């Protein structure tokens, strides 16, 4: 155990904590025994890059020990015939990519926007999502192993029967299955997990289009049908508002440092040839399926939106850089290529550029890490029923609220499936300025109220707002509370993480 300064990206809190880096399950159990004996608690993280949600800073500020599992095993086994990956908390997106590449395994990393240093297990345990075909990362989990707060071991049902091979193939096993109690909770330390990886497609087709606010409803309804019919062959489809697109194309917020007035947005929209919304998605699958989906999308979206483009990943103009430069501006070409490699499962730091929207830090100084670069960020990430009336009300409310708090609403709507749209908005602020921190937190509080008024709620919360959820669910009557009391009577594992 050694002292280490742990910082939070949600505000400017930085505290010295005892850090432990166990390398095996025996060392995890030693910490558990120590905590049970000495009446103290610990906060387990895999990489601890939970940016916008609390990083590795404990949910309860008083938790004295951070258990960083990044030295635990990375890849434990890969069944390349089945695409089944068994791994430990040491595995990051970047390390998985390197492993697959070194072994010429044509499988995709379940990438997110958090870049190569983000963790595969940590992201799944927070129920994160990306954009490759299995974008819901919990959905790909087949089995797991965890150490419980009394030092005993939990294994998924078939493993308990000694059928660990079958366990990795079959998600549920037989009898009660408690795998999911370890997600967004504090019931133990997960030390092994098996997930299904998707094969890297030989080719993908990226589609993009521009949509006005007036055409948004119709576009959403058409995309809902397509997503329902061709699930599995279409990525999560992202719709980004002008402000979100401008953040990728320019540093327009440098002058504003807050909510950008609508007339200025209209000017910038014209200058950057943008629309109210930009739609981006990808078609996966064999040639015939790709062609069918492309045709169906063209038919469904006829007369809706402009600038429709279907770009194949083997497009000669993109792949021959000298030829590409004749047709596409060098910067756009770079972005399109980056987009393809992310959609094909290659982790990238590129999406992390978003966090520098308020800062003039030159590229060469960026560490692509909000903690190291002192950036304040909270993610507001509500899930919305796929109903156009709710989405319309949501957008109207969001603009008003963000304007009141003078923070820019850079909105992404992700079509996850035909029932759910997940929205993500980064709340960026200067964490060294006390008022800016307070303002960002007050904005988040207001957004939680607004969410409940509208019948929506974040799928995941920054640690400082876990209490909001607990206070609203009659916690002491919940099964989670009863289980936690039984399993962890001394409350040693991650107190307050989505709990009281
Ligand atoms: C610009 C930007 C883009 C982002 N894009 C995305 C995105 O596309 N999708 C997305 O989901 N997130 C995204 N994030 C948020 C976040 O950075 C990622 O989700 C990241 O993967 C979480 O950090 P981690 O992987 O290091 O997990 P960790 O921080 O290691 O884990 C997350 C939490 O899970 C628990 N935990 C972790 N490991 C264990 C364990 N072994 N046992 C028990 N509990 C454990 C801990 O409570 C921990 O705090 C983004 C952030 C930024 C700044």
Image: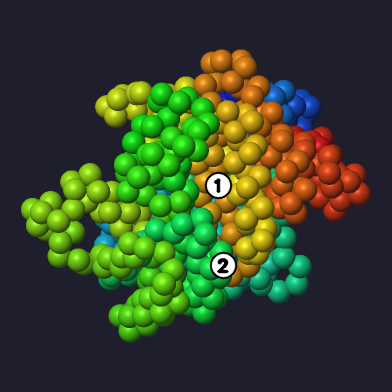
Residue 54 percent location from the top left of the image = 60, 33
> From mark 2 to mark 1, how far is it between C-alphas?
16 Å
Disc 2 is placed on an element classified as loop
Residue 246 percent location from the top left of the image = 39, 41
Identify whether 486 is placed above or below 213.
Answer: above
Q: Quadrant of residue 109?
A: bottom left
Where is the C terminus found, in terms of image quarters? top right
The residue furthest left is 322
- Is residue 28 rendered to the left or right of residue 294? right
Where does label 1 land, which residue?
424
**Label whose residue precedes the other's in the sequence (2 or 1):** 2
Could you say which is closer to the camera, residue 472 or residue 49? 472
Where does label 2 land, which residue?
417
Identify whether 233 is placed above or below 394.
Answer: below
Q: Report whether residue 262 is seen.
A: yes
**Whereabouts is ligand 1, in terms of quadrant?**
top right
Task: Answer yes or no: disc 1 within 8 Å of ligand 1.
Answer: yes
């Amino acid at each position: 155990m050694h002292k280490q300064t742990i910082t939070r990206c949600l505000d400017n809190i930085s505290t010295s904590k005892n850090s432990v880096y166990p390398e095996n399950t025996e060392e995890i159990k030693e910490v558990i025994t120590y905590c049970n004996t000495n009446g103290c608690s610990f906060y387990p993280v895999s990489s601890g890059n939970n940016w916008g949600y609390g990083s590795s800073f404990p949910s309860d500020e008083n938790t004295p020990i951070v258990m960083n599992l990044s030295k635990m095993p990375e890849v434990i086994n890969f069944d390349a015939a089945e695409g089944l990956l068994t791994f430990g908390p040491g595995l990051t997106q970047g390390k998985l990519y390197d492993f697959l590449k070194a072994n010429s395994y044509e499988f995709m990393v379940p990438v997110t926007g958090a870049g190569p240093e983000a963790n595969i297990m940590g992201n799944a345990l927070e129920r994160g999502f990306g954009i490759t075909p299995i974008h819901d990362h919990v959905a790909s989990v087949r089995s797991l192993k965890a150490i419980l707060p009394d030092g005993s071991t939990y294994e998924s049902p078939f493993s308990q029967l000694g059928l660990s091979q079958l366990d990795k193939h079959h998600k549920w096993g037989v009898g009660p299955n408690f795998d999911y109690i370890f997600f967004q909770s504090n019931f133990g330390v997960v030390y092994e997990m098996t997930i299904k990886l998707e094969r890297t497609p030989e080719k993908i087709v990226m589609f993009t289009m521009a949509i006005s606010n007036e055409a948004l409803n119709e576009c959403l309804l058409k995309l809902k049908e397509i997503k329902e019919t061709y699930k599995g062959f279409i990525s999560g489809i992202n719709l980004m508002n002008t402000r979100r697109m401008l953040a990728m194309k320019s540093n327009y917020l440098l002058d504003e440092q807050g909510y950008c007035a609508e007339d200025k947005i209209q000017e910038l929209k014209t200058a950057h040839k943008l629309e109210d919304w930009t739609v981006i998605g990808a078609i996966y699958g064999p040639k015939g399926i790709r062609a069918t989906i492309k045709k169906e999308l063209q038919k469904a979206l006829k007369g809706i939106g402009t600038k429709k483009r279907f770009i194949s990943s083997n497009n000669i103009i993109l792949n021959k850089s000298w030829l590409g430069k004749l047709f596409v501006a060098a910067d756009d070409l770079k972005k399109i290529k980056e987009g393809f490699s992310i959609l094909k499962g290659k982790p990238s730091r590129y999406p992390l550029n978003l966090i520098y929207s308020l800062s003039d830090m030159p590229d060469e100084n960026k560490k692509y890490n909000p903690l190291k670069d002192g950036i304040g960020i909270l993610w507001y990430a509500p899930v919305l029923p796929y109903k156009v009336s709710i989405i319309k009300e949501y957008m109207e409310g969001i603009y008003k609220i963000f304007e009141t708090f003078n923070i820019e609403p850079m909105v992404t709507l992700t079509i996850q499936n035909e029932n759910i749209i997940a929205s993500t908005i980064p709340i960026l602020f200067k964490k060294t300025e006390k008022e800016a921190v307070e303002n960002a937190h007050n904005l988040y509080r207001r957004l939680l109220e607004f969410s409940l008024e509208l019948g929506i709620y974040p799928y995941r919360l920054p640690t400082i707002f876990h209490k909001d959820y607990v206070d609203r669910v009659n916690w002491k009557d919940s099964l989670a509370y009863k289980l936690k009391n039984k399993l962890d009577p001394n409350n040693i594992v991650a107190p307050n993480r989505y709990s009281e």
